[in-house]
C-alpha cells in the first residue's frame, strides 16, 4: 500500500511538472518566455522610475541657456543630445520608444550587453543619440525579457515610431524591414538623413540572422522650444 501511494504521488508530481513545462513552452511560442519576462518587468519598472527622475533634471537651466543662440529646431536638438550623451552611463534609461502599430511603449536603455537588454531595448553605444546626425540603432529581444521587438517583422512602410527623449520627441516613419546576417555592419552606416535602425534576432527562437527595421526621421520637437 505504501508503495502504491508513493507511485501515485510520483505520478502526480511528474504530470504537474509536465503541465508546467508545456504551459511555459506554449506561452513562449504564443507570446514570450514568462520567467525572464517577470524579471524584466521588475527591471523595466525600475528603469521607468529612473527615467522620470532623469526627465525632471534634464535639460537644466544651464543647458537651456546654452542653446539660446542656436537657430533651428534640429540644431537645438543636436546640441541637447550631445550634452545628454555625456551624462549617460551604460545601463541607464535614456528615453521611450513608442510604436503604435505593434502596441509597443517601453523604456530604452543605454547599451546592448546581456545585462542591459534584460531591462528593455538598448541603444547601440557606437551609434549617435537620436537627434544627432547619422544612423541611430536600437536592439531588442523577440522571445525573452518582455520580447519588446517580437513583432518587428509586422512593421510596414509608413508606420510611425516615436523616440521620446528627455530633450526632444522624434518621430520616424518606417521605410522597410530586411533580414540580414549578424555580421552585416552596413545597416549602421550613415545615410544622407537621420535614420533609426531597430534590430532583433531572426527567426524566432534563433540567433542565426537579424531582422532590421529602417525608419527615417520625419518630425522633431525640442523640449526647450
Image (spheres, rainbow, N blue to C red):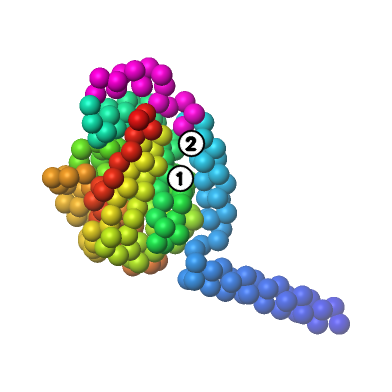
* Residue at figure coordinates x 37%, y 29% from the top left: 224
| Badge 1 density bin: few <14, some 14–19, many ≥20, Cα 10 Å | many
Residue at image mark 1: 107
* Residue at figure coordinates x 29%, y 32% from the top left: 77
In this orientation, which residue lies closer to the viewer: 42 or 70? 70
Residue 163 among those drawn in magenta:
no
Estimate the x, y position of residue 133 in percent, counting from the top left.
20, 38
Which SS class for mark 1? strand
- Quarter of the rendering occupied by the C terminus: top left
- Quarter of the rendering occupied by the N terminus: bottom right
Estimate the x, y position of residue 57 in percent, counting from the top left.
47, 25
Answer whether residue 132 is visible to the viewer in this image.
yes
In this orientation, which residue lies closer to the viewer: 3 or 22? 22
- Image quarter of residue 92: top left
Residue at image mark 2: 51
The reply to whether dot 2 and dot 1 touch (C-beta < 8 Å) is yes
Residue 65 among those drawn in magenta:
yes
Q: Is residue 87 above or below residue 25?
A: above
Q: Is residue 211 above or below residue 135?
A: below
Residue range of the region highlighted in magenta in the rendering:
55-70
Amino acid at each position: 500500500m505504501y508503495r502504491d501511494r508513493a507511485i501515485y504521488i510520483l505520478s502526480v508530481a511528474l504530470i504537474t511538472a509536465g503541465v508546467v513545462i508545456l504551459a511555459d513552452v506554449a506561452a513562449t511560442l504564443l507570446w514570450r518566455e514568462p520567467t525572464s519576462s517577470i524579471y524584466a518587468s521588475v527591471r523595466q519598472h525600475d528603469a521607468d522610475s529612473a527615467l522620470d527622475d532623469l526627465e525632471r533634471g534634464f535639460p537644466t537651466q544651464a543647458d537651456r541657456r546654452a542653446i539660446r543662440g542656436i537657430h533651428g529646431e534640429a540644431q537645438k536638438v543636436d546640441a541637447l543630445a550631445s550634452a545628454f550623451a555625456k551624462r549617460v552611463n551604460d545601463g541607464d534609461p535614456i528615453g521611450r520608444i513608442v510604436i503604435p502599430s505593434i502596441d509597443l511603449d517601453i523604456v530604452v536603455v543605454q547599451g546592448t550587453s546581456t545585462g542591459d537588454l534584460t531591462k528593455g531595448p538598448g541603444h547601440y553605444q557606437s551609434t549617435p543619440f537620436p537627434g544627432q546626425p547619422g544612423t541611430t540603432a536600437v536592439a531588442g529581444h523577440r522571445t525573452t525579457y518582455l520580447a519588446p521587438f517580437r513583432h518587428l517583422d509586422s512593421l510596414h512602410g509608413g508606420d510611425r515610431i516615436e523616440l521620446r527623449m528627455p530633450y526632444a520627441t522624434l518621430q520616424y516613419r518606417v521605410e522597410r524591414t530586411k533580414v540580414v546576417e549578424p555580421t552585416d555592419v552596413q545597416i549602421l552606416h550613415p545615410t544622407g538623413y537621420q535614420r533609426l535602425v531597430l534590430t532583433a534576432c531572426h527567426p524566432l527562437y534563433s540567433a542565426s540572422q537579424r531582422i532590421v527595421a529602417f525608419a527615417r526621421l520625419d518630425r522633431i520637437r525640442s523640449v526647450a522650444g
